[in-house]
Image (tube, rainbow, N blue to C red):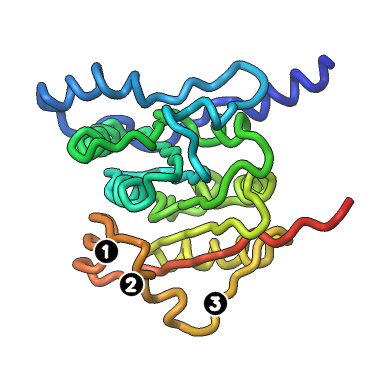
């Protein structure tokens, strides 16, 4: 029992890189953080797992996760397009969280819950086979080699997602950084739990219709960088 508690503690250790705050928030934005964020915030248990059925006011047919939702445009679009699905969004940048909260209030979205913390804490608290889709879109590339350990797409993350995603669930990755693209391709398609079904360049150079553009993508294009879009599927589990 002691060994199990030690493992849980290590697995749920908080690690956060990058900025937490940007420009000073306006009064209306501060009100969103004070009034709306507590209603949408995920409370992680000290031990044990989250019960996804208790997260939303009405039952959801599926649960999707976006890690690092930035300004929240993609997450809000998906939530509005799929009101029957529950969405979990993770982001530590306060200014981005406020933008998502504004979209939630504007569009009356009730199927989003937010964690302003280390995504690994949420991965450790979710039950096995609970996720139908996962998005990691334009994460910080941490280009310096000594910072590669900070990248969200990693063997450890893929191992965690392999446990949490149901058979046939989809993992969507995006980046405009060629170095990070190589990194993703070196890890994700060769992971035994995931299959990359791309047939040609259009499968990773063109964004699907149900994958809305974000300001990060537009910024990359304006800067002359090519965005890349990877879609992988969770392979069926082998019988025990």
Q: CA distance from mark 2 to mark 1?
A: 7 Å
Q: Residue at position x 61%, y 33% from top?
A: 126
- The answer to whether the residues at label 2 and label 1 have Cβ atoms under 8 Å apart is yes
Of mark 3 and mark 2, the one earlier in the sequence is 3
Of mark 2 and mark 1, the one earlier in the sequence is 1
Q: What percent of the width, then of the height, locates residue 6?
A: 75, 20
Q: Residue furthest bottom?
A: 200
Residue under label 1, please give it. 220
Q: What percent of the width, then of the height, locates residue 10?
A: 67, 26
Question: In this orientation, which residue lies closer to the viewer: 196 or 153?
Answer: 196
Question: In this orientation, which residue lies closer to the viewer: 164 or 173?
Answer: 164
Say what secondary structure mark 3 lies in. Answer: loop
Residue 198: mark: 3
Q: Residue furthest right?
A: 240
Judged left or right of residue 127, residue 199 is left
> Visible in this render: residue 22?
no
Judged left or right of residue 48, residue 141 is left
Q: Is residue 41 above or below residue 65?
A: above
Say what secondary structure mark 2 lies in. Answer: loop
Marks 3, 1: nearer the viewer? 3
Q: Residue at position x 34%, y 19% from top?
A: 38
Residue 226: mark: 2
Query: Image quarter for residue 205?
Result: bottom left
**In the rendered view of the protein, which quadrant contains the N terminus?**
top right
Judged left or right of residue 21, residue 236 is right
The crowding category of the residue bearing disc 3, from other C-alpha atoms within 10 Å (few below 14, some 14 to 19, many at least 20), is few
């Amino acid at each position: 029992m002691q060994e199990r508690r030690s493992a849980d503690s290590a697995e749920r250790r908080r690690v956060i890189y990058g900025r937490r705050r940007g420009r000073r928030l306006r009064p209306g934005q501060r009100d969103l953080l004070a009034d709306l964020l507590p209603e949408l915030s995920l409370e992680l248990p000290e031990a044990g797992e989250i019960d996804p059925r208790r997260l939303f006011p009405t039952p959801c047919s599926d649960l999707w996760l976006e890690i690092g939702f930035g300004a929240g445009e993609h997450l809000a679009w998906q939530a509005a397009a799929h009101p029957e699905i529950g969405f979990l969004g993770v982001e530590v940048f306060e200014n981005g969280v406020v933008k998502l909260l504004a979209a939630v209030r504007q569009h009356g979205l009730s199927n989003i819950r937010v964690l302003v913390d280390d995504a690994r804490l949420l991965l450790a608290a979710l039950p096995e086979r609970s996720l139908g889709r996962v998005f990691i879109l334009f994460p910080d590339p941490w280009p310096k080699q000594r910072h590669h350990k900070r990248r969200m797409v990693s063997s450890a993350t893929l191992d965690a997602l392999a446990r949490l995603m149901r058979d046939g669930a989809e993992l969507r990755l995006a980046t405009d950084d060629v170095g990070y693209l190589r990194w993703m391709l070196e890890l994700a398609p060769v992971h035994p739990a995931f299959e990359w079904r791309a047939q040609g360049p259009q499968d990773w150079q063109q964004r699907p219709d149900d994958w809305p553009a974000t300001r990060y993508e537009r910024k990359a294009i304006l800067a002359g960088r090519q965005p890349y879009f990877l879609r992988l599927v969770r392979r069926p589990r082998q019988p025990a």
